[in-house]
Image (spheres, rainbow, N blue to C red):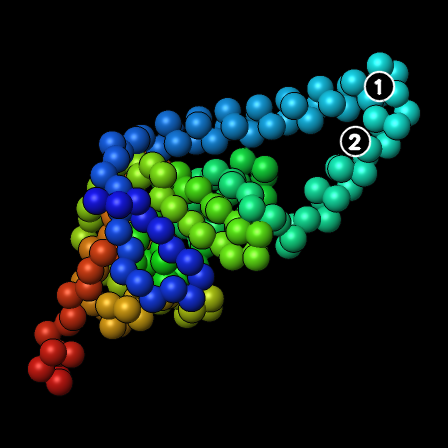
Amino acid sequence: MKERDEEIESTEDVQEEEVVPMSGHDTKLALAMRVIASMKEQLENLEHVLSGRAESDNAERYLAHRASSEEGTTGFSDRVIDGVFDGEHMIGEDGRKYLVPPNYASKSKLVEGDLLRLNVSDSGKFIFKQKGPIERNRMMGTLVQDEVSSDWKVVCEGHAYRVLAAAVSFHHGGIGDDAVVLVPKDAPSRWGALENVIKRAEDEWGG
């Protein structure tokens, strides 16, 4: 199988590469190590500048580079960023949040804690790939909708897992339906991936 690959507004089926699931702890540790390495490199560069070991022209070039990097939140050019899915966004190794297209997250059944990779082309197109799924548990619950926020949730064993509205729409879910969700096996989570919906009998028979 091929790795999951999705472009914004793409309607192609999502396929995935067969990989060994990791624990929620492993995914968080992997991201933390990447963030620490990135921060360490930045701190070493700053220390080099502030200690006077850098020439003035080198310092100016470094500061200019940092400024352009900060301004590049919407002007990426052929970048690759790894991160962890939080239920709606990818938390990148650079500490930023990147919205994952809900249709892609729903079709791919992404679970909170999955490792993702974001490729940003020179034309600004965002392409997400799932790099490391965490270990999952499958649970059965009841689909409900928050009266205040309108958020969709699946209540399983006393815990309410948020699910994407796009997934509810795809499965034609309704309040009170039975629902199957995927959740991290060994890590707490606020989100679940909606896998299937079983309609209420009265809905099926028009009751």
Q: Which residue is mark 1?
A: 54
For the residue marked with disc 2, what is the amino acid? Answer: Tyr
> Which quadrant: the N terminus?
top left
The structure residue drawn at horizontal position 56% and vertical position 46%, both measured from the top left corner, is 78
**Image spot of residue 61 (x, y percent):** 82, 33
**Image spot of residue 3 (x, y percent):** 30, 44
How packed is label 2: few (under 14 Cα within 10 Å), some, or many (20 or more)?
some
**Image spot of residue 42 (x, y percent):** 69, 26
Specify whether 5 is left or right of 82.
Answer: left
For the residue marked with disc 1, what is the amino acid? Answer: Ala
Cα distance between the residues tagged 2 and 1: 10 Å
Question: In the displayed structure, would residue 174 be above or below residue 100?
Answer: below
The structure residue drawn at horizontal position 84% and vertical position 27%, both measured from the top left corner, is 59
Q: Which residue is mark 2?
A: 62
Q: Are marks 2 and 1 in contact (CB under 8 Å)?
A: yes
Q: How many marks?
A: 2
Specify whether 183 is left or right of 45.
Answer: left
User: Depth check: 79 or 91 in front?
Assistant: 79
Q: Given the current orientation, which residue lies at the most extreme bottom position?
A: 206
**Image spot of residue 126 (x, y percent):** 49, 54
User: Depth check: 121 or 66 in front?
Assistant: 121
Residue 175 at least partly seen:
no
Residue 71 at least partly seen:
yes
> Which quadrant: the C terminus?
bottom left
The structure residue drawn at horizontal position 24% and vertical position 68%, both measured from the top left corner, is 171
The structure residue drawn at horizontal position 9% and vertical position 82%, both measured from the top left corner, is 205
User: Which one is earlier in the sequence, the residue at label 2 or at label 1?
Assistant: 1
Q: Secondary structure at mark 1?
A: loop
Specify whether 163 is left or right of 45.
Answer: left
